[in-house]
Amino acid sequence: SQKIEQNSEALNIQEGKTATLTCNYTNYSPAYLQWYRQDPGRGPVFLLLIRENEKEKRKERLKVTFDTTLKQSLFHITASQPADSATYLCALYYSSASKIIFGSGTRLSIRP
Amino acid sequence: EAGVVQSPRYKIIEKKQPVAFWCNPISGHNTLYWYRQNLGQGPELLIRYENEEAVDDSQLPKDRFSAERLKGVDSTLKIQPAELGDSAVYLCASSSHSRQGARGQYFGPGTRLTVT
């Protein structure tokens, strides 16, 4: 079965630095890879997606890369701010089954 | 635009009791999803609807869980009887089309269920 691995330990970053989160998967590459943000007590919020034929995607201070050879996606937040503190989930979308599989998320803390 | 609405936000019940969750998706969204999220884990799909048809319920524990989406709008997820292991957050999400789910789903705030 498909497995998704995200950093299980929390990531602590100094404000202003770049935060980099990792999402690794096994077996098949998805048609799309998505990143969500989840704050305590709230549902996930969609941030970005990247297609299997794309290498990099940017949105404001966010950047996502996708390497189907390494079976890995990296999620970067540049010029990080305390307001960026949250749990970030990666999700893989398989078009053949119209199914999304979520990773367990990485908790990010940005200290002032 | 109103987001996905869920109620109740919190529910505490004793084991063996029934419980129901309600979801109102974003207007115009044909696809509706129910997820269960355990502490420290990502959401796990329970059931997906296309309009009023359940097109993927492979992960729904059918012996105790049931769901319906009458008229292809609101949806209800029921557990009867509840077990201790059902304690989790139940999330509802919607998208304009199942293929649009590839472009991101919109989630509600969830219902936190505690079974004692």
Image (spheres, rainbow, N blue to C red):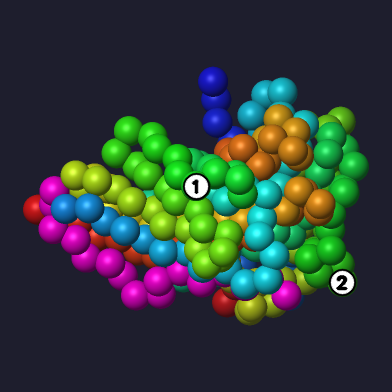
In the picture, the disc for residue B64 is none
Looking at the rendered structure, the kind of residue marked 2 is Asp
The residue indicated by pointer 1 is A55
In the image, farthest residue toward the top = B1
Q: Residue at x 29, y 48 (%)?
A: A77
- Crowding at dot 2, Cα within 10 Å, few <14 / some 14-19 / many 20+, comes out as few
Is A13 included in the stretch rendered in magenta?
Answer: yes
Parent chain of label 2: B
Is A98 included in the stretch rendered in magenta?
Answer: no
Parent chain of label 1: A
| Callout 1 secondary element | loop
Q: Which residues are magenta?
A: A1-16
The residue indicated by pointer 2 is B63
Closer to the camera, A30 or A104? Answer: A30
B6, above or below B112, in the image: above
Q: Residue at x 63, y 79 (%)?
A: B84
